[in-house]
Each structure stands twice: as C-alpha cells, then as structure tokens.
Image (cartoon, rainbow, N blue to C red):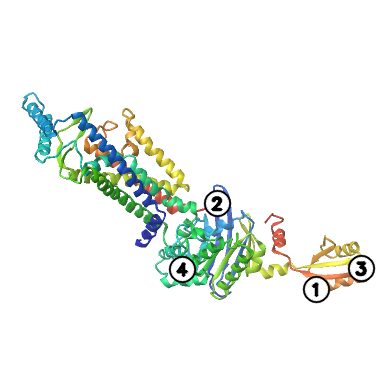
Amino acid sequence: MSQSPALSVNNLRKTIGKKDIIKGISFDLYPGEVFGFLGPNGAGKTTTIRMIVGLIKPSSGTVLIGGKNVQTHFGDAMKDLGCIVENPELYSYLTGWENLEHFARMDPSIPQKRLHEVVELVDMGNRIHDRVGTYSLGMRQRLGIAQALLGDPKLLILDEPTNGLDPAGIREMREFIRFLAEKEKLCVMVSSHLLSEIQLMCDRVAIISKGSIIRVDSVHALLAEQERVVWKAEPLEKAESLLREVTNVTRSEGHLITLYDENQIGNWNRMLVTAGVEVKEMRTKLPALEDLFLELTGGEHIE
Amino acid sequence: MNKLVHNELLKLFRKKRLFVIILIIAALVPLFTYAQYQEVKTTREKLGNVDWRTQLQQEIVDTQNRLSSSRMQDDWRKYLKIRLAQQQYYLDHNINPQAPGAPTFMRVFVENSIDLLLPLLVMVVAADLVSSEASGGTIKLLLTRPVKRWRILLSKYLALILSVSFIVTASAVLSYAISGVVFGYGGWGMPLLTGFSTSGEELVTNTVHLIPQWQYILMEFGLVWFVCLVVGTLTFMLSVLLRSTAAVMGIMLAALIAGAILSNMVSSWESAKYLFMVNLSLTDYISGMATPIEGMSLGFSLIVLLVWAIGGLVVSFAVFTKKDVY
C-alpha cells in the first residue's frame, strides 16, 4: 500500500518486573481498513492497546499515530485517535449529551456542530439527553463510539466492541464499523477473542499469543491457505489408507479431511476411483479461524 | 485550562457532593447554636440577678487595684492593662461579654471545627476526585485526549481549591446567618485579646494586644482555609495513589482522628510535632490555648503543614503523570 500508515507499531515491548508481557510486536495499519487484533484472553491484546493509546508506557519500542509519536508528541498523536478501551465507561450521573460536551471541551479544535454530527452518526436520537445510568449496554456502546469519533480521528481503536451485545447489536456494530472504514475512510482496529467476529468484519488480522504476534495477514489469504477438502467415500477405510500414502488425512464423523491442493486434487480422486473406491462427495471447506488459531498456536485454548 | 476546570466543577456539582456538604453544615449549625444558647442561659442563671454591668464594673476595679500594687513584673502589668482596656470597652459600648452575638458564635464554631469537622467535609470532596475516575474506568477516556496528564490533574486540583474556598465561605455564611436568628447579628467590633505565645511552661503575654472581632474572625477563617487546603491536598494525593474511594476516606479519617487523640497525649513525645495532624488547630495560637507539644508556634505549624502539602502535591503529580493505567 502506498498510503502512509495510520498507525505504526514498532518493536513494542512491555516488561513488568522480570516478566515480558509484550515481547516486541510490530505492525502497520492503513486508512480505510478494518484490522483485527485476535488472541485469547490474557495474550496481551489489552496491554498492547493501552500502550498504543498512551495509557501504559512501553518498556521500549515506538507507537506512531498518523506519523506522530505517542511518547514524545502526545497531544498531536491523540488528536488523530479515538478509542474505547474495554468497556465504554462514561459518567453515569451525566446525560449522554453532557458526556460528549465534557470530552469536547478537552479539545478546543472540536466545533460545537461536531456533537450533533456524531450523535446523528451513531443514531442516538432523543435518548442522548437521558442520564447515562439509564442506558442499556448497546446505547452505552454507541455513546462510547460517539465520544471516540468526536475529534474526527483517523484511527479508531475498539477493544472488544461486541462484548455483551445481543445478536442484533453485534450485527449493527459490524455494519457500522464497515461503514466507518469504507465511507469515512477511517482506519479501525478491533480487538476480539471471538474469531467469528473478526472473520466477518476485518480485512486484515494480527494473531497474538503470549505477547508475540504469530501472524499478520489478510483474512482472505489466511483462510485460503488453510482450505480443506472433505471427502465422503465407500469404503471409508480403503479410501483413508490410499489417501494417507499421498497426503495428511484426518478422519471425522464419517468424513475424511485433507489439505486442498489444486494441482493434486484431480489425481487423488482418480487414484481412489481406479482403486475401486466410490467417491460420493468432494467439497472444499474454508476453515473457521478457530481451527486456524489452534493450528497456529499449537492448541492453545481459546473461547 | 478554564474548560478543564469547568469539567471538573460540573462533575463535582452533578455528583451533588457540595450540596450534601452544605446540607450537613446547615443541619449542624442550629444544633451548635442551641448548645451555645443553653450555655449562655446556664451562665446567666449562675450569676443570679446581678446585672452584668455591675459585675464588669467590679472586675475593672479589681484589675485597677492589682495594677496599683508595686510588686509586679512589667509584662504582667502590660497584660493587665490590656485586659482593663478590653473590659472598659465592653462597659463603654454596652456589650455583655457573656452574651454572644452571631460573630462570636462564628468564632467559637470555627475554633472547634478546624481540626475535625471542616477537614472531614473537605475530605468528602477530595477523596474521590481522582479515585472515582480510576474505579469508574472513565480515566481511560480522560487520559486519551489531546491534553497532557499534568494539566488534567492540575484542573482537578484547582477544582479542589475552589471547593475548599466554597466550603469555608459557606460555613462562615451559614454559621453567621443561622446563629444570628438567636443571638442577634451584632458584635463585629468587640475587642478580643490575641498575640499569646508560649515559652517553656509559661504563657508569654508581653505581645498580647486587642483587635476587633471582625479582624480576629477573618484571621481564623484564613487559617481554617489553609488547614482545609492542606487536608484536601493530602486526601487528593491518596486519591491519586488509590483506586478505592473508600480506602482514601478510611485512611484520611484515621489520620484526622488520630490527630485529635494524639493532641491530648503527645506532650512528651516531641517529634510528634512534625505530624501534620497534630498541627491542625491553628486557631489555638490566636486564642492563646496551650499547644499539644512544647515548642510549637503558629509559624512552626504553618511550615509543617506547608511542607506536608507540597510533599503531597509533588507525589500526586509525579505518580499521576508517570503511572500505567490498567
């Protein structure tokens, strides 16, 4: 990509005591993309995000937001950033509107009309003048996004944005995030431990485990690489032993699963047929990120 | 910075903290007024039907007799002369020294609330100024704005100073307005003795002089404001250090009460005079009460409190600007 990155994380480390929490991670994010940050709970997602937004001081490494270093040019860097870290915790004794006013006052470059714009954008309607204490989680999530968008950021960081939302809310959030990236050309970074979520809304994904990034790639490429073929054949045992001679086979619930290899798949089929095996079904299957994750981390448990 | 302080005041106001404090003062002042009123009544009954003017006249004659005696040290003679001037003033201006007006009530109220009541009220405001943002998680939103951390903390501290000023002013206004209903609103010009100091076991009286009550009260409220600010600053520091508002309040409450207890029992533990909580009763220096520990003076206590407050501020800012927020 020729654009300059909206976020550039360079060899970021965090050591607490003698323990390495984050072991030197690097990645770049570009405008207009939704970037998934995926890992099991405790892998270091939130610590990394907190270092990016300046809440935690990195032990070493740099974070550039729109080219500005968070450590040395905090104010400038923060102008390009909107974020929700973990839950959208706002002042429950103020109304939604007062919360927005409160945060708008902290940045003189935010014009008054921007408040109306963000309220419209997240579709809060008249509930904006109710006390936040009376909001549902979904409403609070929207208000959280509204406050994150106040400063017209180039980078939006959402930590577990669908946590606790109902299915309709999750769908709505997903569409909204896509909208922000595609129409508003924002760069959105979404962390999640829910793999299906990332799969549905992200362009690229970084997989983090035990403080290191295992892989950064486009979701599409990752999935394509791990494509599988599911075989249904009679007799199954014979088919399995034949296939085993040429590739890795796993057996599950009356199916055989092999890797997908475009050049070989025809030969394998012919081999089975000539050996007298009746091939009843052959289909390709995209693995869920769940499977992928287990494979990449060597079976580390995730939810 | 104005806008940041605006934010902090808005939050304070909407949390209704200041409102509750005003309510507490407004509830307590009538209580104290009644107690004071009862005391005056008892004194009056003890004196019987003797007219207070006659009694004052008698006291003046007594003092004059003692002054005419030749075997008397100079400083004591000077002190008696001032006493005499004070008594004469009461008589000339038809002021009954046993019957207080609202300003006298204010003075007594402030002298008795300087070491515990008002610091406690200030503590209620200061305790959750920072810790509530940490425990509520809103600190994450606050610190990811294009505003440096020290400015956010400074805005909170300025809001604290304003709140302290508000609480002290409100307690002055309320104690005057409410007690005046019973005692009358006069008595601002009444002369009072001040300028006492202690040297060793002795009360040094050669610097004693008379000042009008309004000046006396102004001085005392200035001292109260200072004490409240110091207590507020230390609470503020704990609020930065601890996430739990309850813990902040607990520690501060323990310290303040320990101060009240220690003041009565540390006379031989000399180094205790460097603790901030035994130095809170600044008004005692003006009224000439005995100090809890030998060698304490108004200047000493002011410096001790100032050092504690500056220390608290330094710790607050150092920790707040550096700490990792989880």
Q: Are marks 3 and 2 on the same chain?
A: yes
- Determine the chain carrying the residue at label 2: A
| Residue bearing the label numbered 2 | A15
Residue A39 versus residue B285 in the image, above or below: below
Amino acid type, callout 4: Gly
Task: Indicate which label's residue lies in the foreground, 1 or 3.
Answer: 3
Amino acid type, callout 3: Val
| Residue bearing the label numbered 4 | A151
**Image coords of residue B126 (percent x, y):** 39, 49
| Residue bearing the label numbered 1 | A263
What is the tally of numbered marks visible in this picture? Answer: 4
* CA separation in Å, label 3 and label 2: 58 Å
Q: Sort mark 1 into few (<14), some (14-19) or many (20+) by Cα contacts within 10 Å.
A: few
- Determine the chain carrying the residue at label 1: A
Residue A151 showing in the rendered view: yes
| Residue bearing the label numbered 3 | A277
Instruction: Please tell me which of labels 4 and 2 falls first in the chain.
Output: 2
Q: Which mark is residue B62?
A: none
Task: Indicate which label's residue lies in the foreground, 3 or 2.
Answer: 3
